[in-house]
Image: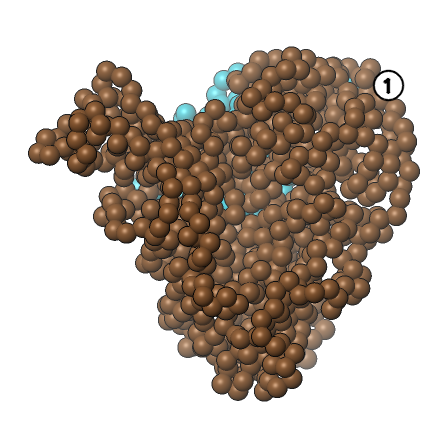
Chain colours: A brown, B cyan
Amino acid sequence: MKFEEPTSDNLFDRAMVIGKATPRIDGPLKVSGQAPYAYERHDVVEDQLVGYPLGATIGRGRITAMDTEAARNAPGVAAVVTTLDIDPLEISSFNNARLFGGNEVRHYHQAIAVVVAETLEQARHAAEMIDVTYEEEEGNFDLEKAWQNGLGTDEADAETGNVDEAFASAEVTLDETYRTPDQSHAMMEPHSSIADWSDGENMTVWTSSQMIAWARKSLAETFDIDEDRIRVESPFVGGGFGAKLFLRSDAVLAALGSRAAQRPVKLTLPRPFIFNNATHRSATIQRIRLAAGQDGRLTAIEHEAAAHEFEGGGNEENPTNLTKLFYAGANRRVKHHDVVLDLPESSSMRAPGEASGLMAFEIAMDEMAEKLGMDPVEFRILNDTQVDPMNPDVPFSDRNFVDCLKVGAERFGWSDRNRKPGDTRDGLWMVGHGMAGAYRGAPTLTSGARVRLERGHLTVETDMTDIGTGSYTILAQTGAEMLGLPLEQVTVKLGDSRFPASSGSGGQFGAASSTAGVYAACVALREEIARRLETDDVRFEDGNVIAGNKAIPLEEISADAEITAEDTMEFGDFQDDLEIGTFAAHFVEVGVHAATAEVRVRRMLAVCDAGRILNPVTARSQVIGGMTMALGAALSEQLAVDKPRGYFVNHDLAGYEVAVHADVPDQEVIFLDTLDPAISPLKAKGVGELGICGVAAAIANATYNATGIRVRDYPITLDKMLDRLPETF
Amino acid sequence: MNEMFRDKIDISLTVNGEPVEGRVPAGQHLVDFLRGALGLTGAHASCEHGVCGACTIKVNGEAVRGCLMLAAQADGADIWTVEGLSDQGTIKDLQDAFVARNALQCGFCTPGMLVAIDELLGKEGVPSRAEIREHLSGNYCRCTGYEAIVDAVETVARARAQKGAA
């Protein structure tokens, strides 16, 4: 099926199941410890051995020798495969850093050996016995230096109007530079796989992946074998946030170990290994210039940024992308420098580009509002746009950003905010209020599904994944809605390469795309049922198919044999002529300790515009989770780079500080009641990445409002404010 | 391999109410004994050094990190994991509240979180939201944020107190 024009009125506008608050259907499995995550799938294949990886301890260079004799002779060891034992594996079309093979070391903790043994303890111990000799080379690990060299060089990526003239003649201007650090996804489940490639022919990988079809294709390319010989399963994923979009070394090492030992091998990447072995969000440096008249209308915007990527690319962290679209303004120039560094591969993490871009841009907007003497909410409302400002012929399909701002201001009590920085006290705490806008695109990807009706029970099969987002539940809701069945009469099976290929989970495209895929398959099933009843006028209600004045139970229709249908939703080119996005306004209150500069977030509010909300329960959770991750980004998360040696120093969950219970205050989310007919038949856009966008800047702005100290270098830690605190407290 | 590591130690303990005997390597973490030798699936290893709480289990009545305790230390211990607590039915109200409030997304942290909450709710009185947050700060969640978890715990604590008073 092809989605070729915006949806008109349809059954989702009179929905019985979609849009209703529905507890996740996979909840009971998860709260009882029975959900099968990759490493604990003890029952999928017998005789599992355990693999343990060894990582390089240099940032760049080559391996001259590896002594594995002791390891190979250690108790319980079944196989040792080193990077010198095999030719360099192909770099798949989804990867940039080679996952294994050859003597070249291109990043710290690059996998250089896997030890396979009867037990984890034996494998781990033997791995430590491998003696590696390196020839270290100088590497380039310094983004700051590259930024200084690159600033102002090269053609703009996009430019409209006359930016220089607009700045020269502007009444009010701003020119500031902002920094966001390298960040880690830090999902709770480490990368884990069980691989069975015992016969060296057919490979089965039980893994933790956001994208089944991509994982399979990557495995085929990496090992140069036919895709038909590979099966990938990932029914439960313990978080991803982009970390599990692409094949990682866990699956590769497990497969190599399995081939060598001729038995299935399970392997999890040790947590301290993940930060440098796998991917992360690149640090960014961003110079933002704004120009406006005294009336507050933006006349020019310039955004120049740099982030780092592994040689060959792959980094999606372009903070200037959103700057082309978010606010009005006739003159605009954006330029992004993708700097090649020898750090581990930077890659997509939740809202790549928008997350870091808004961390900077929405502080700049706050600073500009202050210069103009305007309320930052009013300033944003004044500079709203309903068209792509660089291509005014391209409208937004449905943009209600101004409503987000107005509703948020009202609900938060913005009019009662602290107005003058440093003016409100609560004992030892300086209290401040801040807000920020948020924008995140709403892409769609081709998505397929198969549906089977048997004795009135519907089974949905698609290789879509549920990374915690709620896919199981919203796909069950979609199926139930389409066939007029109660939710209990729908089973959803996900994450298996034997099922039709879906969009997968990522980029905020999963919910919109995969529900449309299930819709397409259900349309095909409805047509098949109609064909059998020799009519084309059917409705599906209360477990019945209604043809004319006759109601026939679906149970009866599918009593003798199962009825199946399969289809794929493709999204038409008309979407290219529109800007389809999601919007939010964030409001935050912080307290900053007058003696220590400790920042405590006291309350948070998000107002979101993302079209139809398929399930308010799971959607709310997505946004609150995003706000929480952004709180970490604002105040504590930072991968520290050892610039001489080229690696992330704080590579564990104690040194990389994510927000915990005690850091997070009461949070509230409001969804505007909007519909976007241009996105899909369900008129629903994703929310999972919107939730992280803009929040950190709202915290930064509230911190400024509390103290009068402007920090432009995330995370906002006490050391950056301590020497500028008030003399007395 | 040094002798200490090579040593295998015989242990006998109770896991989820069942007597268990094992011969474990001295260097084996308790969580790896539970999921490896016993084939359990509830306690998950995440940070592997005691900060995240995903492997939290109950040892002799106390919430303990399964990744910080050695299997060899568990000789004679009475151990409960989320599977056993589920079968026993003692945390059913809490599990139901987690589902109803959507206090989980990916669910990887959930079993450890539930065990830590079970310990909190075993204490006297109804904990405040601040006390709940404080008690659970050693249990990370990266998906859901914490709001719904606090809601679920608060709901159950109040309901239990009411039931107790009635």
Q: Residue A492: give x, y in percent of width and height.
A: 38, 30
Q: Nearer the viewer, residue B18 or A316?
A: A316
Query: Could you tell me which residue is drawn at 79 percent across and 41 percent down?
Result: A106
Within the image, what quadrant is residue A322 found in?
A: bottom right
Q: Nearer the viewer, residue A327 or A729?
A: A327
Q: Residues within 10 Å of mark 1 (few under 14, many from 20)?
A: few
Within the image, what quadrant is residue A194 found in?
A: top right
Asked if residue A717 is positioned above or below residue A224 in the image, the reply reads below
Query: Could you tell me which residue is drawn at 50 percent across and 82 percent down?
Result: A296
Q: Residue B60: give x, y in percent of width and height.
A: 55, 29
Q: Residue A336: give x, y in percent of width and height.
A: 67, 61
Q: Chain of mark 1?
A: A
Relative placement, left or right, of A678 versus A335 is left
Residue A296 shows up from this direction? yes
Asked if residue A683 is positioned above or below residue A536 in the image, the reply reads below
Query: Could you tell me which residue is drawn at 37 percent across and 53 percent down?
Result: A678
Relative placement, left or right, of A236 versus A530 is right
Relative placement, left or right, of A522 versus A295 is left
Within the image, what quadrant is residue B79 found in?
A: top right
Q: Residue A218: give x, y in percent of width and height.
A: 62, 32
Relative placement, left or right, of A90 versus A470 is right
Residue A360 shows up from this direction? no
The quadrant the C terminus of chain A occupies is bottom right
The quadrant the N terminus of chain A occupies is top left
| Element class at badge 1 | helix
Q: Which residue is mark 1?
A: A69
Asked if residue A650 is positioned above or below residue A198 in the image, the reply reads below
Tally of marks = 1
Asked if residue A700 is positioned above or below residue A564 in the image, the reply reads below
Q: Amino acid at mark 1?
A: Glu
